[in-house]
Image (cartoon, rainbow, N blue to C red):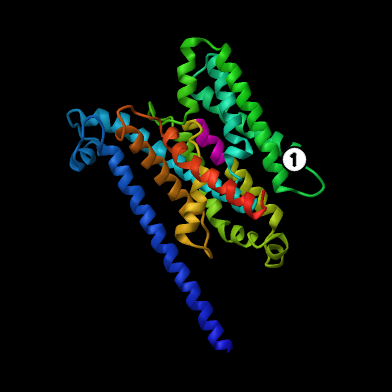
Amino acid sequence: MNTYSSEYIHAGRASRLRRWNWVTALLTALCLALCCAMMMLGNTIYPVKDVIRALAGEYVQGASFTVVTLRLPRMLSGLFAGLAFGMAGSVFQTLLRNPLANPNVIGITAGSSAAAAFCILILRASGMFVSLSAVAGGLFAVLIIFIMSRSAVFSVGRLILVGIGVQVMLNAVISYLLLIGAEQDVPAVLRWLSGSLNGMRTGEFIPLMVTVALFAPLLFLLGKQLGLMELGEEAAATLGVDTNKTRLIMMLSSVFLAAVATSTTGPISFVAFLSGPIAKRLAGTGRSLILPSGLTGTVLVLGADLIGQFSFDTRFPVGVITGILGAPYLLFLLIRMNRTGDL
């Protein structure tokens, strides 16, 4: 009986590992395919050989400027923003054990958006100053939400409700700023608020790339502990996990990832919200979902950007497309949670 149980456990573990490996490999291949499509497609379609020559530094008529100066920054911004949003969303949902918990609800994107709108409309600032202010605004909003939701016993529901309240208040501030701002500055704010990869230039995505390079490996290393914390605080502590330290590191890492991603591309709707559940449905349970969630976020961002560019007569920002995809899922989730009594 013990031998049979051991073999059954090992077989199940091997099956879950194979599924995780296959899904991760397929998501990686899909990300690479979308990156290639981003580099090749546009008003002018360049063959692969011209794209490679341009990226290698060789001068190619038309392609050198278009590919290197316009398409490469756009593609890299979408790639790293998708990774950041996907990983951050998965960590929030796992740690708080609630599918509604994501950077949008926790207030990061609203804080960053309000700070960016203030800088553009009131201070008439641009560039790096707006990005830094957006990061600071997101971090400040998170701090306020955690302070307001503190009590003797930690409550995920209280945190989410406070986050929603702060988000509504900050959205009202943004609306007020749009009303009093100079008319010529409003389009820039609206474009930023919609979440867009338009107009990305070389260097603008560097802070995001550095942030992902710093915090993504840390999240990967703590992925096993995160999985154990899904079992509950007491069970994870019994298995040797320092729950307080792990939660603090992963929450801070996720907050920075989401804040810097938002400051770079604007608040791309629902990517952090959708990536974790999709990755979990594809890769299953039993393994860390941080990497699959990050890859899923990249697929969503790059795929939505391509759809927004080429599927309609009018070109739409990536955030509009992800919003269209994510809103029905949010409604479905709310209805299901209401029926099961989780709300």
Seen in the picture, residue 125 relative to 57 is either above or below; the reply is above
Residue at label 1? 149
The residue range painted magenta reads 256-263
Say which residue appears at 41% left-offset and 38% top-offset. 78
Magenta-drawn stretch, dominant element (helix, strand or loop):
helix
Location of the N terminus by quadrant is bottom right
Residue closer to the observer: 100 or 2: 100
x then y, percent, for residue 231 = 65, 63
Say which residue appears at 53% left-offset and 22% top-offset. 129
Which residue lies most toward the front here? 339
Helix, strand or loop status at disc 1 = loop
Q: Amino acid at mark 1?
A: Ser
x then y, percent, for residue 273 = 53, 44
Which residue lies most toward the right here? 152
x then y, percent, for residue 71 = 31, 33
Seen in the picture, residue 327 relative to 239 is either above or below; the reply is above
Seen in the picture, residue 16 relative to 92 is either above or below; the reply is below
